[in-house]
Structures are given as C-alpha cells and as structure tokens.
Image: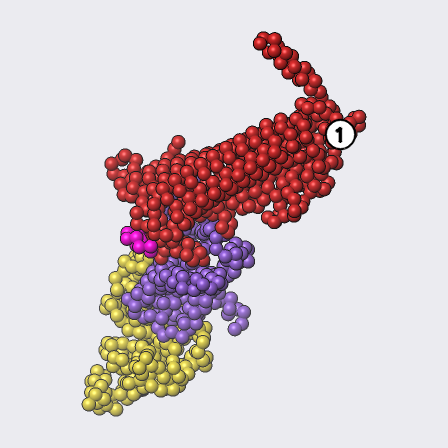
Chain colours: A yellow, B red, C purple
Amino acid sequence: MVTIKNLYKSFGKNDVLKGLDLEINNAGIFAILGPNGSGKTTLIKSILGMVIPNKGTINVQNENIKNNSNYRHKIDYLPQIANFPSNLKVKELIRMIKDLRGKSTLDTSLITTFQLEPFLNKKLGNLSGGTKQKVNIVLTFMFNSPIIILDEPTTGLDPISLIRLKALIQTEKEKGKTIIITSHIMSFVEEVADEIVFLLEGQIYFKGSISKLKSQTKQPDFEHAIASILQENHA
Amino acid sequence: MAKSFLFLLVMTMTCFSYAQKINVCETCPISSIKKAISEANNSDTIIIKKGTYKEHNILIDKPLTLIGENYPTIDGEMKGEVLTIVADHVTVDGLFIKNVGTSYTEDYAAIRVKRSNNFLIQNLVLEKLFFGIYLEKANNGRVFHNKIIGNAEEEYNSGNGIQLWYSNYIEIEHNYIEQVRDGIYLEFANNCTIKNNISAKNLRYGLHFMFSNNDTYQNNTFEDNGAGVAVMFSKNIKMLDNVFQKNWGTASYGLLLKEINDAEITRNTFSKNTIAINIEGSNRINYTNNNFKNNGWAIKVRGACYNNYFTKNNFLYNSFDISYNSKVNDNKFDKNYWSNYTGYDLNKDGIGDVPYRPIKLFSYIVNKTPETIILLRSLFIDIIDFSEKVSPIFTPDNLLDNNPYVKQIEW
Amino acid sequence: MNTQLRQFYKKTMLKILKYSFYDLMRSRWSYVYFLFYLLLGVILLFLNNDLSKAIITLMNIIIILVPLIGTIFGVMYYYNSKEFTELLLAQPLKRSSIFLGQYFGVALSLSMSLVLGLGIPFIFYGLFKSAVIWDFSLLLINGSLLTFIFTALAFNIALSNENRIKGFGFAILLWLALAIIYDGFFLMSLIIFEDYPLDQLSIAGTMLNPIDLSRTLILLKLDISALLGYTGAVFKKFFGTNLGLIVSFVMLFMWVILPILRIVNKSKKKDF
C-alpha cells in the first residue's frame, strides 16, 4: 500500500529524515510515534506530497508520488490544526470539498454522528476548536478512500465524540483500510493501534505490534515501553 | 475767391463724371484684363465678368478699381506674378487668383503692391500660390476679407500668405490663411492693425513680426501652426483677445517673444500648446487677464527677462506653469489664479493665505535633460518637487505669487 | 498527461479561483476597498466637475495605490489562508491549480473592486456620452493589470518567505522600490548620461518598471502627448504609435506572466 525507500529530507541544515525505509502492505491501524522532532509530521507530509523529499522514493498503491497528485484520491487526511476560511459556513465548506474532490454520500451520516446539524449554517470563524475538529473529521471520512492518515485526531474532542471517533476508526479498519495515526495520547494509541512505527532521529527505530514492543523492551505496559526507548537513547 | 472755388468744384465733378466702367468678359470686345487696364483712364472701374483669364504679370499703373463679378478666375499658369500694383488709390475686389509661379530668386506673389498708398484689397480667394499678398513699401492700405489657401509642404520653397515689408499704417482684417509658410509676416512694418483673422496649419508661424513697432493684433485665432505667433526685435506691440491653440510639436509654442520690449498681452487664450509663451530677452511686458489652459508649459522664460508683470491670469491644468533656466528672477507674479494651488483662504477674501510657488524643480530638470519628461507625475518627482517647494535650491526663491486667487478670475 | 486529467486540473483551478473569489468578496476588506474607490469617484466627479482633470487625479492615485494594495493584500491573503491551503494540498489537487486559483481569486476580486468602484460613479456621471471613455477604459485596464502584476509579485514573496513579518517587509520594500526608488535611479541615470542619446535608455527604463509603463501609457492619452514633442523624435514615435502601444501592453502582460510562472515553479518545490 505504502512503500518508502531510502527517504532523506532536510530543512536547511536540519536533517530530519535520514534514509528512512518503511513498508506498510496490509490493512490495519498503524501508529507513528516518536519524540518531538523525530520526523513524524515530515514523514506524513512526505506521503501526502506536501513535503518534497531530497532523496528516496515513495509509492502509494504502486504509484510513484513524485510530480503526481492523482494518487491523493486514495488518501483521506486529517490535518493537525484545522483552520478554515473564516467567512465560509460549515455547509459551504463541506460542499466545496465535495466539489473539489468528488461526490460523497457519507457526509450526512457523519454530520449526524458528530451532531453538527446545528452548526451547518454557522461561519467557521465562529466555531470552537472542538467543533472545528469535528468538521475536520467529517471532511476526512467523507470519501471512503483505502488509506486514511490522521494527525492528532483527538485534539479538542469531547468524550462522546472521542468514542464515536474510535468506533469510526474501527469500522473503517474492518472495511480493509490502512489507517495511519500520529498521537501523543498513549492510551489512545494503545487502544486502537495494531502496529507501532517508532521514529528516532529520522529513521525507523522499531516496527511491530505493541506486544512485541513490550517484550523487546521488557516493560509491563505500553507507556513504559515507550519511555524506556527514549531513556535508552538519551543515555 | 468764390469764383475760383466754384471752378475747382466743377473741375472735380467733371473729373468724376469721366470715370467710366469697362467690362471684361471672354466674349466682350475687351477680353483680357491687361487690355482693359491699358485702355482705362485714371479712376475707371474695370468689371471682370465670370470666366477664366489666363494672364500673368498684370501691371496696374494707374488709380483703378478692379471688381470681379461672381469670382472670375485669373490663372497665372505658374508663370510668375499675377497682379502688380504700382499706383496709388487702387482697389482690387472679388477675384479668384490661382497658380502663382514659384521661383528661388524672386518672390512672386498673387498680388503685389509696390511703393503705393491708399489701396484696398478685399474679397479675394488665392490658391496654389507662392506668396499671397505682398506689400512692398506700401502704406495706408487695407487688406480685408481674403481667403488664402496654400499648399506649402517645405519651408524653403514656400512663401507667406500676407507679407508686409517697409509698409506702415496697414489694416489687415477678417482674412483666413492656411498652409503657407508664415500666415502673416511683418518686417519693418509699423503702426499696423491686424484684427479678426484666422491663421491655421501654417508651416512656420501663424503671425510673424520682425523689426516692427507699434502694431496691434486683436481677436485673431492661431491654430495648429508650426508655432502660433513670433514677435521678434519689436517694440510696443499690443496683443489682445487672441486665441492660440494646438501648436504642438518639437520646440513649438503658442507665442514666441524674442527681444521684445514694452508690450501688452491681454485677454488672450492659450490652450493645448507645447509651450504657451516662450520668452527670451524681453522686458517690461504686462501680462494681464490671459487664460493658460492645458499647455505643456504655460510660460517658459529663457535668458534675461526683466520687469515683466503677470497679473490676474488664469493658469489652468498646465503640466508646468512656469519654467526658468536660471536662478535669477526679476519678474513679478501677483494675483493670478493657479489651478495647482493647494493653499487655503481662511479670511475668505478670495486670496489664498499662503503664497504660491509656480515653479517646480522638475521643470528645471526637464529644461536641462528633456528626456526626463518621461517621469512626469511620478511619485518620486512629486516628492522632490515638494522638497524644493519647502526649501528652494535650484529655482528662484523669490518667484512667488504672494496673492494667489482661490477662484478662477473672470473679466 | 492525458487530456482528461488536464481537463480535471483546469476545472479544479477554476473551482479554487471561485472559492477564493467568493471568500474575498464577502470579506470586509473588499468592501472597504470598493467603497474607497466609489467615494473617490463620486468626490472627483461631482465636486470637481472636470472629467479630464478627474482622470489625471485618478491616474495619480491608481499608479501608486493599486500596486500597494495589490502587494499588501496578496501577502496578507496568502498568509491568512495558509492552513486552508494545507488542507487543499492534501486533496488530490495539483499544487499549481491551488496557488493559481487563489492568486486569480485575489487579483480578480481586487480588480472588481477597482473597476466597479470607479466605474459606477463614472457611468452615473454620463461616461458613455463623454469623449474620455477611452482614456477612462485605459485607466481601468491599466489599474487591473497592475493589480494582477503586484498580486503575483506578492504571492512570490509570500511563497519564498515563511516568516510573515519578513514577507510583509519585502512586500513594502518591493512597492517602495518600484513606485519611488526606481524612478530616482532612472532620473539619476538620465541626468548622468545626458550627453548621450537618451531615447533608448528612457524607453528601456520605462519598459522595465510596470508602474512607469502604466503611467506613461495613461499620460500618452493625457497631457504628456503635448510635451513629448519636446523630447526626441524616437521617443514620440515609439510611444505614440500602435506598435509602441502593443509593445507596452506585451510588456505589462510579461510582468503578469513571469511572476505567475514563478508561482507555479516555486509552489512545486516548496515544502508545507
């Protein structure tokens, strides 16, 4: 599904990705973790084509993404900070994204799920952060693409919406999709992720299931396992 | 005493009663103008009927009246001068004269008055000419209501519409002149009056004075000439109520003053000229109640000009109002209206409370480097103009209108 | 690229243009900008009562203000819609369609404010019956071209500078350079080289700055034509003819096209 080979990216003198190789070939939920500055966002943005790598190739569903934008039809992306044109109404934004990307019939049920009906005629500039995030989620899940990338999806969500989001992610997974998530909330990751991809200094430090991570680090629980990796490498 | 007076009266009456009319037409006994003149007695009237007369070098050597009926044509066939008047008291009226010969050695004219007085030339139409009406040492005459249409294309082989040379006390009125070299040219011609003429599309000047004094021109229109009017080396010229317009082009101007002293320039309108008035070495001239509208330069002062007085003129939307090429100013500007004035009039007396400085740094720069005109109305230019206005460095600092009107002046 | 895909990209660009345009049309700033021109037109026409004079004053304002507003607004819009741009970038849209769409949206809405703001009072004044309609149209065409040029330059600046403060700084600097400083150097070089034939230099100098070029084009229809005779014949010949007019407009279009090409190019290589 997603194949990354020998990926290098630096911003000025700051080398962020240093020859990263990653292959995600099966369905499931993959959590990309790593300390700040390890290159998580750069990796995701590289897959999305928002960051242009210095070196290396990325294939999404056997399609090289270089100078290509069409492959993004196969990816749904939830950006970290959703900031929409403040003059647009929620309804208009949804209509606009549909207009740009293609038809969708899922939007109405998603709107109901996240209880956005009362906000449809409100301008985006007047919405709270949590509501904006819900709109963001609706926009992401509207298109039913085989790959879903979620960057900090839980930000600002109330508990009910969080539960609904988790359920949504599970449903999508059951459809046989590949879901890539970054998050700082370890409990959330532990709950949903099938596999962990741990980034450290621009390379993949660990890739495998949570249980494998626990046994490798000899730690009883997930959070400690992560912490031990970080400690080990800082020592 | 009474007897001799009676005798004189009778003599005079008989004289007049002898004045006869001679008809000239193509089928008449007298079919040529020359023959008519040679057979005529003094003071006779020759009536020229409608028709075409192919004649040139017609000499009028006695006091006669020539009248054309329904504009008979005299065709000079490009062979030389057409009519030459060498006697006093001659009247020529109502002729259509064409095809005057062109020469590089002699100034052939459609009609020439030579060393004669008290003549009247009126209602003529002149076409295809070299010189039109040429007055040579002729005085006390009147040139009235003629139409002179030239086809001049180059200055060197074309002549003037009406030319005066050593001729005084001449009245030139209601003539229309176009496309000759100079519309009206005066050289050593004093005390002449030029009124209500239109002079247009001439190659050089609409009206041209050289070494002529005490003349007046009034109510004339000068349009689209190489330059409107040139007044050179002359004194006491009155220029009143004329219109100077559309004299555009390289070094073109509405009015050129060169070495002129003691003149009056009043109630004239200058519009759309590259330079409305170009002044060189001219002193003691009063400019009053003139309108300067939409010219490139309203007044361009070159060389030494002293004691000129500009008052109650309207300066309207000229790219430059005044231009000097030196820092010295001995001329006075007072109580004019300047459309570019941005001051205020708090006491409402109709006169702006801050003086107006009509000269811009940019006009000084353009004088030095003409190509810089391309930067006209650039913000940078506005900025340097403003700084010069605040503290003059390059332009005469005493050149101010201390009493600028805030409303256009009417008269 | 197959034609179907190309069609799709063209369509998406137009869609983004449409959204940016509507977004701006509903923003306060567009109204302010529109009302400013409306007021200006009304004041100039109904207080001044001299149409040609009004056009000269308008020209003075347009050649200074339009570039300034174009640059500032362009930079501002780019930075303000940055997050939204990122949202679009993750969609299956070509980068060039996103940025060109936004660029044309901004430039069009600014031009609309200008054309309508000035056009409405002039129409009420009886422009269609007036002889200056061509001068006025030339003024609006020039104003719109300047909007397109300076918005494009602004997008270039914003694309090259992540730092907003720096971006705004460069935008102001660009305006200062082209509106004022350039003419200073231009004037200096004309004066320094006054012993040489200056026709070519002044034509070149004018051609290379869109503000100068617009100013000259408008002035040619107004007062400068009386003055141009004063300078060399070459100059008059050039700007006074149809060829000169065509070359001038080609140059203005180049000033639009080249920055647009750089927007396309730069946006392809940029990381977000």
The residue nearer to you, when weighing A217 against B296, is: B296
Residue B153 visible within the image: yes
Residue C124 visible within the image: no
The residue that appears at 39% across and 48% down in the rendered structure is: B304
For mark 1, name the chain: B
The residue nearer to you, when weighing B162 against C68, is: B162
Q: Give how far across and how far down residue B379 sits, in percent.
A: 36, 55
Q: Give how far across and how far down residue B334 sits, in percent.
A: 33, 39
**Secondary structure under the numbered disc 1 in the rendered image:** helix
State the quadrant of the N terminus of chain A: bottom left
The residue that appears at 34% across and 52% down in the rendered structure is: B327
The residue that appears at 43% across and 72% down in the rendered structure is: C265
Count of numbered labels shown in the rendering: 1
Residue B391 inside the magenta-drawn segment: yes
**Would residue B143 appear left or right of A13 to someone viewing this image?**
right
Question: Does residue A221 sit above or below B144 in this rendering?
Answer: below
The residue nearer to you, when weighing A230 against C30, is: C30
In the image, which residues are magenta? B382-394
**Would residue A90 appear left or right of A224 to someone viewing this image?**
right
Q: Can you identify the residue that label 1 sits on? A: B35
